[in-house]
Amino acid sequence: MPFALRLEDLSFPDRALVRLAFSRLVSAPPERVFDVLADHEAWTRWFVDFKKASVTSEVREGVGTKRRVWVGPMVLDERFIAWERGKRFSFTMLQSNLPILSAMVEDWQLTPVEGGTRVDYKVGFDLPGWVRPLKGVLLWKFRPLFEKALPNLEEYLRKS
């Protein structure tokens, strides 16, 4: 894949050009939620347009783990920058098959609450200069993927 992205850290979703944030209470303990997030192949069953995932590093779990994902028309290589069971699951994008992103981080934070877990999901991304005029169109296309993630995750947890 020829389009390298700028690597970012855990603070990026709060300072990116495009910032999305979603929260939801789910009736599963944080460890169970984390286990579903950490099951790379399970994402195909609850994240919209997530077609496939494969771990591309020798290590399958933990900070530094790499995976390739197919989401809609995009193929993305990711590296995990946070992996705290029952607490946090975050990754930065390394490269993409399409030149529409310059940087991206997804951050999932899990907080135990009475009866389950509060899931806070943040996504931050930057766009190359030539793509910025299309920001509205891209948000129209991709925002629903992220908006549906938490309700779909909750339903998946309930059924599995």
Image: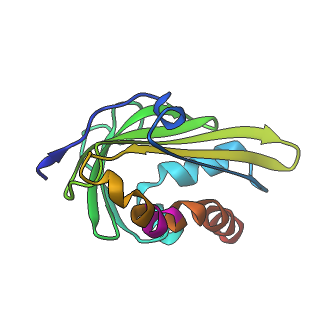
Image height of 121 relative to 151, above or below: above
Whether residue 43 sits left or right of residue 67 in the image: it is right
Count of numbered marks = 0
Q: Which of 122 and 117 is in front in this view?
A: 122
Name which residue lies at 28% across and 54% down.
Answer: 131
Name which residue lies at 25% across and 39% down.
Answer: 58
Whether residue 124 sits left or right of residue 53 in the image: it is right
Q: Does the magenta-highlighted stretch encompass residue 13?
A: no
**Is residue 47 at least partly visible in the picture?**
no
Extent of the magenta region: 139-143
Image height of 129 relative to 138, above or below: above
Q: Nearer the viewer, residue 144 or 44?
A: 144
Residue placed farthest to the right in the image? 114
**Is residue 122 at least partly visible in the picture?**
yes
Residue placed farthest to the front in the image? 133
- What scheme was used to colour the molecule? rainbow
Whether residue 121 sits left or right of residue 74 in the image: it is right
The image quadrant of residue 141 is bottom left
Whole-percent x and y of residue 4? 18, 42
Name which residue lies at 64% across and 38% down.
Answer: 86
Whether residue 81 sits left or right of residue 159 in the image: it is left
Whole-percent x and y of residue 151? 67, 65
